Image: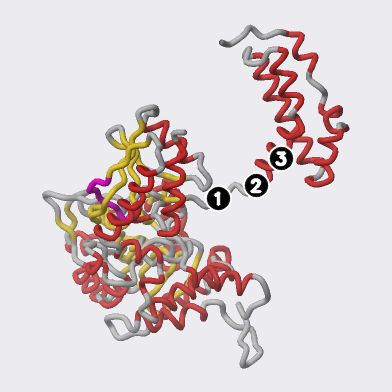
Amino acid sequence: MKQTAKPELFRELPSVDELLRSDGVSALVVTHGMPAVTDGARAVLARLREEISSGLLDEAALRLALGGVAEAIEQQVQRALRPSLRPMINATGVILHTNLGRAPLSTAALDHVREVSGTYSNLEFEIESGERGKRDMHVQRLLSKLLGESGNGQSISTIVVNNNAAAVLLALNTLADAGEVVVSRGELVEIGGSFRIPDVMAKSGAILREVGTTNRTRAADYEKAINDRTRLLLRVHRSNFEITGFTEQASTAELVALARKRSIPVMEDLGSGALVDLQSFGITGEPSVLDSLRAGVDIVTYSGDKLLGGPQAGLISGRADLVARMRGNSLFRALRVDKLTYAALEATLLAYVRRDHGAIPALKMMRSTKDEIGRRAEAVAKGIRQSGSTIKAEVIDGESVIGGGAAPSSTLPTRLLAITCADLSADELATRLRASDPPIIARVEDGRVLLDLRTVFPEQDRAIASALAGVAQ
């Protein structure tokens, strides 16, 4: 039962200086440094004051707490000095979970990043000539193999910036600064983080020219809007939503034909940027970069850490002359990426060149079958039952999603671990899973905690079983 706070207990608390001079705490200073230990001592004392004020500590409890104050300060220091960015287990079934870092990198990408970043590299150096080189060449050579030529037989060039929003900004600023860009009202999207196409366009210096309506925009709407100030036709792939019912959208072929007729480039912001045909994964409605380029789109922008399965990056692929203009834009230097990103991206693209799609974790997760996931889920459930835990685990049918704004209407059939506990609510159980090491992130639906092993690496199954077996004890 909570006691009334006793003012005299506050006088029992030592000062920060007294703590720092004590034997146990002074030893921590040698290991962790004065600033960190001082902050830790202040935090522990503040916590004790709060517990006294709340009536949670009486004289005996305070004496016990002060006896272990050095250990409490050490734990506080260790928590403060631990990296904030931590690995987690994604059991949500959302493959490209933006809040959890989107696409996990392949082993080859991690190895290449470690190899390149731990020493010097030829980031901007041509080994044969001994001259300064361009960092683009490390991925340009691979994307040339993957993308080939455009639908007009022109060579395809690619540059890399730090994310797709930067790619859109650079492209619009280069091709349409102070000019008009024609875009359908149904494509003026906002995605996570309040990224809005109209806002990015305004920052780029381009002038938005909306055409059509939210649900219906025809090629004729674009053509009527073209004037002597028009610099670009823009198509934006709808992310995180779709429009159904009484709808109409100008086809890519119609826009390309109109652009050729009026000698205006056409650009497509694909967002997710698939480099493979996703229909073989059971995913529809998500065009690939190659589809757009072969259809004659002049410039395509897309992400590196979504369907491509690599690091965060924004890629701009298209007509060599237009990409060259972007490379010469002063914004490009401000938005370009470093050697770590190039290393991870190069290794990821090499897997595509080798057609080793199974080496890319996000693609491997998409290809996992319902039966494969079900067998893993049954094994985890069996382990929980044999552990004697009060947790109840059953395996049920469910659905996984792609996430990251990709294929919003597509789902993948899966098997879910449905977890309940008589002594804990679903929310309390999910909270305890998040507090495990590593934290386990799951879904809560209909009073149950649901775990989808599609987005869990097989070697993490044991950690989930162990956490679930112990979480209710």
User: Disc 3 marks which amino acid?
Assistant: Val
Q: Nearer the viewer, residue 333 or 375?
A: 375
Q: Secondary structure at mark 1?
A: loop
Residue 313 on image: x %, y %: 47, 64
Task: Compare marks 3 and 1 and give the one earlier in the sequence.
Answer: 3
Q: Is 208 placed left or right of 184 in the picture?
A: right
Q: Name the main secondary structure of what is drawn in magenta.
A: strand
When the figure is inspected, residue 419 is found, relative to residue 92, above or below; the finding is above
Q: Which residue position holds label 1?
A: 86
Q: Which residue position holds label 3?
A: 77
CB under 8 Å between discs 2 and 1? yes
Q: Secondary structure at mark 2?
A: loop
- Queried whether the magenta region covers residue 376, the answer comes back as no
Q: Which residue position holds label 2?
A: 82
Task: Compare marks 2 and 3 and give the one earlier in the sequence.
Answer: 3
Q: Which residues are magenta?
A: 395-403
- Queried whether the magenta region covers residue 398, the answer comes back as yes
User: Disc 2 marks which amino acid?
Assistant: Arg
